[in-house]
Image (cartoon, helix red, strand yellow):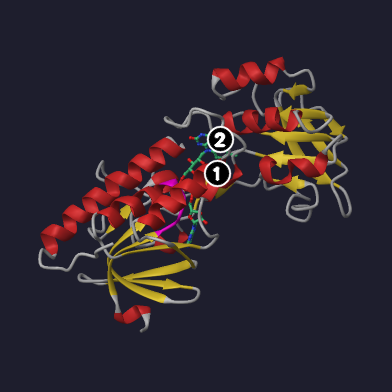
Amino acid sequence: MSQAENIHDVVIVGGGPAGLAAGIYTGRGGLDAVLLDMMGGGGQVNTIDRVENYPGVVDPESGIELADIMRKQSESFGVAITFDEVKKIETTDELLTVNCTSENYSAKTLLAASGASHRPLGVPGEGRLTGRGVSYCATCDGAFFRGQHVAVVGGGSSAVMEAVYLSRIVERVTLIHRRDSLRAEKIQQDRLFAADNIEVLWDCAVEEVLGNNEVSGLKIKNLKTGDPSQLDVTGMFVFIGLIPNSTFLKGVVEMDDFGFIKTDTRMRTINPRIFAAGDIRQDSARQIGTAVGDGITAAVNIQEMLDTVTPDRQYVKS
Ligand SMILES: Cc1cc2nc3c(=O)[nH]c(=O)nc-3n(C[C@H](O)[C@H](O)[C@H](O)COP(=O)(O)OP(=O)(O)OC[C@H]3O[C@@H](n4cnc5c(N)ncnc54)[C@H](O)[C@@H]3O)c2cc1C
């Protein structure tokens, strides 16, 4: 049967922590839920080397392991991840149509849990040399730079954590930061300053990535003095913030100037059938714990809304 003929209680877009937490709750609640993810799920957690600030995870655990546990838990309640990319949402008062690359889905409600993606620097050479020395994931690509000198760009917790991770693999790390102090958590900063193969270039910005087929260096500018310099590195890892994956909801829900979705405390958007959870939400703390909390809050409120609007519907028995 075509998916379009089947009206689901909820379509969850995104299989990161927010979507998987919602999958566990909607599955346990007996809702007919479909969970779509264009990458197979896990989200940004797949890129974390060690998760140590998610309550309950006491031993150092890799992000990949944690994501796998969440995925299996959601599947155990009948909500498995379907590979598909959501392109557009069409709405009527009664129904939502979720247009994807391979299939279209009809649903009574939708949860946008499609998270966020890395923000590029936007300098010459970056796009051309991505995958050839430019990377946005130290856990994925760090091993390619064993024994080499690499740069990390950024000053928040992700940049500092990844610089420390890389310092255990590579010969030398240079952290390049636009300001004269870091925004990262204190524990991360302590680890950074304790590493004897990490140096920090304060008040500096990357102006260009150099190299023909592979990264051979970076053009740097000191933002206080205006002085130019060149840093000879073979890799550049960029951690300067996130862009929300919300394009498919443009014009359908309210967003801030950056594209993060506005919700109330029940994760409701201005469209009564559309909810949002996790990193895609305006004012999210952008952590695994907050994404999970948002996903649960959204699932509970979706169930409540469906109970009010369609009290006679059939529950799924798992
Ligand atoms: C390097 C790094 C280190 C981090 N370290 C920590 C840490 O130590 N502790 C911590 O708590 N947090 C950490 N975080 C943050 C944490 O990973 C995120 O806050 C969390 O993953 C957000 O979950 P989410 O479900 O909202 O979104 P995401 O994890 O971004 O998942 C969104 C999912 O949606 C899918 N998707 C996107 N668009 C579409 C579409 N159109 N159609 C279908 N699927 C789509 C994506 O494929 C993805 O799987 C780190 C993040 C990074 C990048």
Region rendered in magenta = 13-17
- Looking at the picture, how far across and down is residue 59, in whole percent? 53, 29
**Amino acid type, mark 2:** Glu
Disc 1 packing (10 Å; few <14; some 14–19; many ≥20): some
Disc 2 to disc 1: CB gap under 8 Å: yes
- Looking at the picture, how far across and down is residue 299, in whole percent? 28, 51
Mark 1 CB in 8 Å range of ligand 1?
no
- Looking at the picture, how far across and down is residue 203, in whole percent? 70, 24
Residue 159 is left or right of residue 221, and the answer is left
Mark 2 CB in 8 Å range of ligand 1?
no
The secondary element bearing badge 2 is classed as: loop
Q: What residue do we see at 78% from left, 17% from top?
A: 196
Magenta residues, dominant SS class: loop
Residue 184 is left or right of residue 226, and the answer is left
The secondary element bearing badge 1 is classed as: helix
Q: Mark 2 points at which residue?
A: 61
Q: What residue do we see at 74% from left, 52% from top?
A: 130
Q: What residue do we see at 80% from left, 35% from top?
A: 150
Question: Where the C terminus falls, by quadrant?
Answer: bottom left
Report, in whole angstroms, how far the alpha carbon at label 2 lies from the one at label 1.
7 Å
Q: Can residue 60 be seen in this view?
A: yes
**Amino acid type, mark 1:** Glu
Q: Nearer the viewer, residue 206 or 74?
A: 74
Disc 2 packing (10 Å; few <14; some 14–19; many ≥20): some
Does residue 31 lie above or below 236 as drawn?
below
Q: Mark 1 points at which residue?
A: 65
